[in-house]
Image (tube, grey):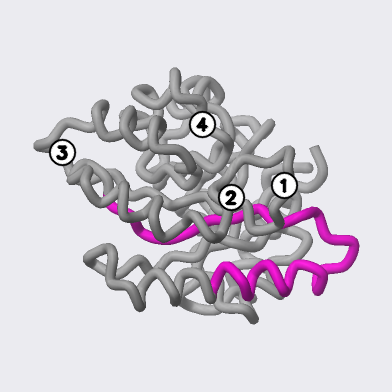
Amino acid sequence: MTTEAIAQRCRDILRRVPSGVTVVAATKGRTPDEIRASLRAGISHIGENYVQDAEGKRPFVLEPATWHMIGHLQRNKAARAARLFNWVQTVDTPALARRLAAARALEAAALPVLVEVNIGREEHKAGVLPEAVLPFVRSLIRYPQLSVRGLMAVPPVPERPNDSRPHFRALRLLLEDLNRERIADPAPDVLSMGMSADWEVAVEEGTTMIRLGTAIFGPR
């Protein structure tokens, strides 16, 4: 796909997405030129799945952007991720949280993080099980270097967009439960849910952040 076609897709999506919903361009396998085309068209958030890929691309992307880690993060790459990304959306173990906090200097601004939830209870996926989210968040607030901003999930791949609705609704209710407990201050308010196949359903269910790859860049 040409960079102009990418830019046009970005403009079309941004016109359709309600205010208050952040579009994160999921750039796994995309080139710096493709990323730059999306930024020039109005996207301001970039999501990468791998630390090493982001390290290779960022020097060639000169436009201002907020960079998100949206893939599974290995503990041995936590220190690099804490320095490289503006957000980490896939915190799912105490050990990973501990390493991210240790790598973030106390004098620096707290790193915004999301708790990844295995909302579909899939054995092959990472993420905290729903019933473990509240105690896990309680364990995170001991780290002033981390700011727990909300929840993130990758539901099972849907055959139809509406198949994702129960998972999106469950994640939203989980965030509401979390805030009723007043565990974190300020109250987490970010729901990162919805991808190219089902983002419109996610919007209907209250998402605040969608992660779009194919919808912006076309098939890999």
**In front: 58, or 181?**
181
Q: Is 89 above or below relative to 18?
A: above
**Residue 111 or residue 173, whichever sits in front:** 173
Q: CA distance from mark 3 to mark 4?
A: 21 Å
Tell me if residue 41 can be seen: no
Residue furthest to the left: 107
Q: Which residue is mark 2?
A: 25
Decide which of tag 1 and tag 2 comes sooner along the chain: 2
Q: Quadrant of residue 187?
A: bottom left
Q: Name the N-terminal-most of marks 3 and 4.
A: 4
Question: Mark 3, residues whose alpha carbon is within 10 Å: few (<14), some, or many (≥20)?
Answer: few
**Dot 3: element:** loop
Numbered tag placed on residue 217 in the rendering:
1
> Foreground mark, 3 or 4?
4
The residue wearing badge 4 is 73
Q: CA distance from mark 2 to mark 4?
A: 18 Å
What is the number of the mark on residue 90? Answer: none
Q: Given this view, does label 1 or label 4 mark the residue nearer the observer?
A: 4
Q: Position of residue 68 (x, y in %)?
A: 46, 43
Identity of the amino acid at label 4? Leu
Q: Earlier in the sequence, mark 1 or mark 3?
A: 3
